[in-house]
Image: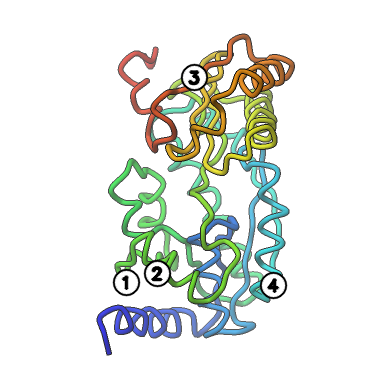
Amino acid sequence: MNSQKRKYEKLKRYIETKGKDGVVIAFSGGLDSSTLAAVSYNILGDRVVAVTATSPTYPPEELEEAKKVAKEIGIKLYVVETDELSNENFIKNPENRCYYCKKELLERLQKIAKELGFKVVFEGTNISDLTDHRPGFKAVKEMENVYSPWVDTRFSKEEIRAIARSMGLSIQNKPPLACLASRLPYYERITAEKLDRIGKAEQAVKKITGAQQLRVRDHNGLARIEVGKNERKLVFTVEILDRIADDLKRIGFKYVTLDLEGYRTGSMLLTIDTADSR
């Protein structure tokens, strides 16, 4: 048995042991949570359910995608609403904003688990994620009976993608997700109006260009568009640029710009030095 097979067997034993009394999975419909849900469902059957939390921070088109993937897997899906925008600690948008969001989500999932007579919650952080700025993971470590199977069994993003491919999952090539609040500079107050503007802008740019890896960063009404590095060629025609500018101004942006470096994680961390955080 090669090392990857041994690692996968370890993951299955982990899921069976931790999940023997029932599991609720934090399910965004992205690669990590979907693959975790598929593996867990194969092992635990009806002892595992998926829960997707919707809120103004969750890209609206992703809910339909999550429903499709859950149906593909065969797992039962619950959809609940969370309200991060009622939490002042979150809407002030500090560097650890994700901690408050993750904590609320996990507390909600714990309650659902209890109502179902289940014991634990699984969430989809992987070992590659921990090389980035991940304040939300602090909430995971603080919570009782909340586990991160990918981290605990040392699976990287690419190893998870390989499992998704081997299972034939439709999300095997899906790019990383992030909540819409991540498009705002730290310490710029988060509002429902800004999140709505960002969500509509990203839908518009995807429709015009066909780009899959995309962020529209909102700098106080200036749109800074990041497209996947290998997808930048999709936007480089005068016609496409004009259509994007027209649509985003109609949505409410004052200026529309393209980030020549393309998409990269953590680009908003560069705003911290100049943010008015005091």
Tell me: residue 60, above or below residue 29.
Answer: above
Question: Which residue is under mark 1?
Answer: 153
Tell me: residue 189, above or below residue 41.
Answer: above
Residues at marks 1 and 3, CA–CA distance in whole angstroms: 37 Å
Question: Which residue is under mark 3?
Answer: 188
SS label for mark 3:
loop
Tell me: residue 133, above or below residue 275.
Answer: below
SS label for mark 2:
helix
Question: How would you rate the neighbour count of disc 2 (Cα within 10 Å): few for under 14, some for 14-19, many for 20 or more?
Answer: many
Callouts 1 and 2 close, C-beta under 8 Å: yes
Question: Which residue is under mark 2?
Answer: 149
- Residue type, label 2: Pro
Callouts 3 and 4 close, C-beta under 8 Å: no
Residue at x-position 57% and y-position 25%: 190
SS label for mark 4:
loop
Callouts 1 and 3 close, C-beta under 8 Å: no
**Which residue occupies the foreground of this view, 1 or 273?**
1
For the C terminus, which image quadrant? top left
Instruction: Report whether 147 appears left or right of 83.
Output: left
